[in-house]
Amino acid sequence: MSKKYSIGVDFGTESGRAVLVEVETGQEVASSVYIYQNGVIDEKLPVPGKNIQRPQVSGQTQAALPPLEPDWALQDPDDYLHTFQRTIPAVLKEAKVEPVDVIGIGIDFTACTMLPVKADGMPLCVLPRYRSNPHAWVKLWKHHAAQPEADRINETARRMNQKWLERYGNKISSEWFFSKALQILSEAPEIYAAADRLIEAADWVIWQLTGVETRNSCTAGYKALWSKREGFPPEAYFAALDPRLEHVVSEKMSHQITPIGGRAGGLTARAAKWTGLKPGTAVAIANVDAHVAVPAATVTETGRMVMIMGTSICHMVLSEAEHLVPGICGYVEDGIIPGLFGYEAGQSCVGDHFAWFVENCVPAAYEHEAQERHLDLHSLLEEKATALKPGESGLLALDWWNGNRSVLVDANLTGLLLGATLATKPEEIYRALIEATAFGTRVIVESFERHGVPVNEFVACGGLPEKNHLLMQIYADVTGREIKVAASKQTPALGSAMFGAVAAGKAVGGYETIFEAAKQMARLKEETFIPVPENKAVYDQLYAEYLRLHDYFGRGENNIMKTLKRLKAEVLTS
Amino acid sequence: MSKKYSIGVDFGTESGRAVLVEVETGQEVASSVYIYQNGVIDEKLPVPGKNIQRPQVSGQTQAALPPLEPDWALQDPDDYLHTFQRTIPAVLKEAKVEPVDVIGIGIDFTACTMLPVKADGMPLCVLPRYRSNPHAWVKLWKHHAAQPEADRINETARRMNQKWLERYGNKISSEWFFSKALQILSEAPEIYAAADRLIEAADWVIWQLTGVETRNSCTAGYKALWSKREGFPPEAYFAALDPRLEHVVSEKMSHQITPIGGRAGGLTARAAKWTGLKPGTAVAIANVDAHVAVPAATVTETGRMVMIMGTSICHMVLSEAEHLVPGICGYVEDGIIPGLFGYEAGQSCVGDHFAWFVENCVPAAYEHEAQERHLDLHSLLEEKATALKPGESGLLALDWWNGNRSVLVDANLTGLLLGATLATKPEEIYRALIEATAFGTRVIVESFERHGVPVNEFVACGGLPEKNHLLMQIYADVTGREIKVAASKQTPALGSAMFGAVAAGKAVGGYETIFEAAKQMARLKEETFIPVPENKAVYDQLYAEYLRLHDYFGRGENNIMKTLKRLKAEVLTS
């Protein structure tokens, strides 16, 4: 039998990426990236003629459209279809693989990224009648304009004593499904009414591939308040939010949620034409980019936490039982791996933090040195910071430059740096910021363990583990846990390909379960980061100080951070 | 009668400056600077041959001398004599003034800057026998190696319940006279024994001009624990420090302290030759650079605080009565203006703070912009920060990058910056640091007022008022007090010239008192900084938050700053 392949397609914020993977070994044979033509739409809707396949905004020139308001972030669903059309033929061509040898496809997506569509799956934004209404377009995960709706969802849930709220650390995000849906209803009731379906983009692209509308358990659980045992919140709750929302699930969504790891359907003739694959090729149930990376990082069991480390960190860990852990983003049965509870937590400011520092706080002399030595500034700072011992800087920071998304769940907290003297150097501050994010991870890990979810070691993936070895060692030293690193540089796409191989099944050369697929297709790097006991001992002392500041400023004893934010808002509007 | 002149000579850290002033108007007619040949000696003693007028280090080549230890800072007394020899003839020549028309000379000096000399005034360091011993040289104010001795002085004083300690905020500095004297005795008893006199450099240069040894009330009071009513600490106290120190005052100093404002003597023939002035020209009692600036800033009465604003801020205010004010550096009767108590406080990190920020924390993009627009970085930051409203940055800092020298008197406190987000810009941090130093000044002012010393307005002098108008406005807004600015850019030299005119007396065209001299010779700029009520209202809110952090971190509730410093010291020595 010839070698069999699976394709994983990872839909990111700016681009989509296909990776062709050999099913037996997990080897990544070819990859291709499509940069979305309309990218992140956050200023105004796309100009006429920019998308040649779709009708123009009807009745008015695009210049007449008002600019989008702050915090909006939309996307064009055609960019997702273009991703299939461009990248899948490209990887087949690059690897010289016959379509018949591709046994499955899986996809993963940012989430919650959702859109309103007609009953046949047609996005409202492609219909001339709705194309000039921003609410007809895809709301990207980082569309943050639905905060008033999120506030309403939270208040109403608390008032009605909704037990499901606990599963999400007692706070629903403005990024999530019903915040966005409620914003459509509130601001564009005509769009809400015209939408036969409201759907995650992840499920929508699967629909486009298979002709079958499915709803995956991962986004339903993490973003749409669904649980396997309790389903969605009751209609009375939705009615309390808005009477028109009472039947939203049965009218515009679905009570039938499909566990990840399953097969959504086979490729339609139309989708086969787009991709160059055979009609009927198995397509997996949709997944989320972070969650699908977990098995690709070899983790399908309890006790090993996956950290996806990039601009932010997403922490994921599995458990056999249900536990309430304060400040986690959520937990979902079957949400990551079938049969287990998947727990997710996050830090909102990690790579972003260092990027801010490099852009705003590093003097010209360092830039000159970096240029002369052909280093980037991050590498220069890492080199200088590596020469310091733990505790040597005398600095301690609270990593709240973008609020606290973990145990405190408070976006209005802000950053703190303590201990500076006239001898403090930039690399000392840089190291203190890294250490602060590591302390933030330790808080999360200890919260999990305290509430019954053990974390014995880490597996890291994402951009940071490649880029910053100092950071990885500091995380190991601060947490006292070994950190292994996923071998793949594109774990989401690999994970999607693994689910594609599971959707295809053993009979055609794939796998019965994601457990088997992970065993064969996922691997770790040989290099690992092992805690140095002397460093750990110093960091234990610093962590105690961190915790004290964390609680003092984060738990209400001194609300100065909020006072300053309020004052800022007041003086800016006065 | 032809115009009469007085000369003020200001002995700074790196150079000495003479200014020729018209007595009737205070007009500064000419000035001349001599940069000390041997500058600040903090690495090794001057190389042989560098000073041609003195014998070389005896018996060994200078290369064989060990380097000075950290925290040492010495000077060469010959540099002070060279200052007279170079600068006074230069101002006479520049202004084409006849020596007969110069009626008086005054000097001011850094303090405590002290040296061991023989009975005839010969510095030990110029004698071949002692020249290779660092303890034979002038100990400059910023010689900080006498900390163990300062600790002993403080402990012994507390143990013996010495009441004079209160006058100095309950803490003696390593910079002060007896710390330095005790270090000589402890580390170089042969130098201590050989020294017939231990003397402030301020008084020593007056001795060199007049042939008369005098001791001024300003340095005696602020730096040598003397008070007009109680004299020096008792001999039993000195004996407790070290039996050999028991009679230090009567043996090597003097109980006869001369109030500032008096006449030390007339110029000797030798000094007349050095300077080109007439023998017998009146010479004023010595003074200290900061304190002599007070009348030069027009202040000879209570209620108006002089701020000398440079790398640090020195705050001085007069009062008719004696008050204990926590955290002030000291108060001295007749210490600044005869007949009044002079109070001194300080902030250790102001201009230094902004210099640190500009050197370490401003990105290359700002440097490029500054270069293109032919601005220095401070001016660019000031411009950008001026565009911000109070409270707009959302930031608050504690100005302790160099410890707290004012009400908390704690060198082990460190800096704090709170409120940063990913949108925080360098100019926002820059402004927050300025605001923090202004809050620090407000703490000092409120402490004075709470303890009976009113502060109704400020008069500023020094480098910062010229350079940074934003800073001055922020100080006015934060403190709610008008800030006037001294017209002279060289207030210490002007003040010294004023005291020179008073030493000369009315009969020869001078003045009877410093009050009269100040009325005629000192003036203010027209520009003043008046508090803006809306800004004050916002700063009142920020100040309340500042105070809360100040007390939380500064008064023992959370000693994290000290913990981090201790940890730093531990890891550096492990």
Image (tube, coloured by chain):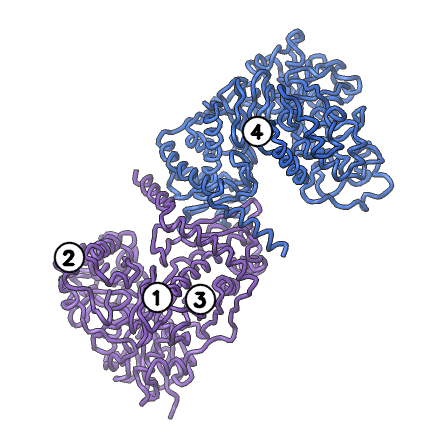
Chain colours: A purple, B blue
Q: Which mark is residue A463?
A: 3
Question: In the rendered image, is residue B142 in sight?
Answer: no
Which of the 4 image quadrants contains residue B226? top right
Give the residue at x 37% y 74%.
A493
Three-letter amino acid code of the residue under disc 2: Ala
| Placement of the N terminus of chain A among the 4 image quadrants | bottom left
Give the residue at x 41% y 49%.
A552
Q: Chain of mark 3?
A: A
* Whole-percent x, y for residue A105 in the image: 31, 79
Rounded to the nearest angstrom, the CA distance separating label 2 from label 3 is: 43 Å
Residue that numbered label 4 is attached to: B166
* Whole-percent x, y for residue A512 in the image: 32, 85
Q: Nearer the viewer, mark 4 or mark 3?
A: 4
Residue that numbered label 1 is attached to: A344
Which of the 4 image quadrants contains residue A253? bottom left
Q: Image check: A7 left or right of B355?
A: left
**How would you rate the neighbour count of disc 4 (Cα within 10 Å): few for under 14, some for 14-19, many for 20 or more?**
some
Three-letter amino acid code of the residue under disc 1: Glu
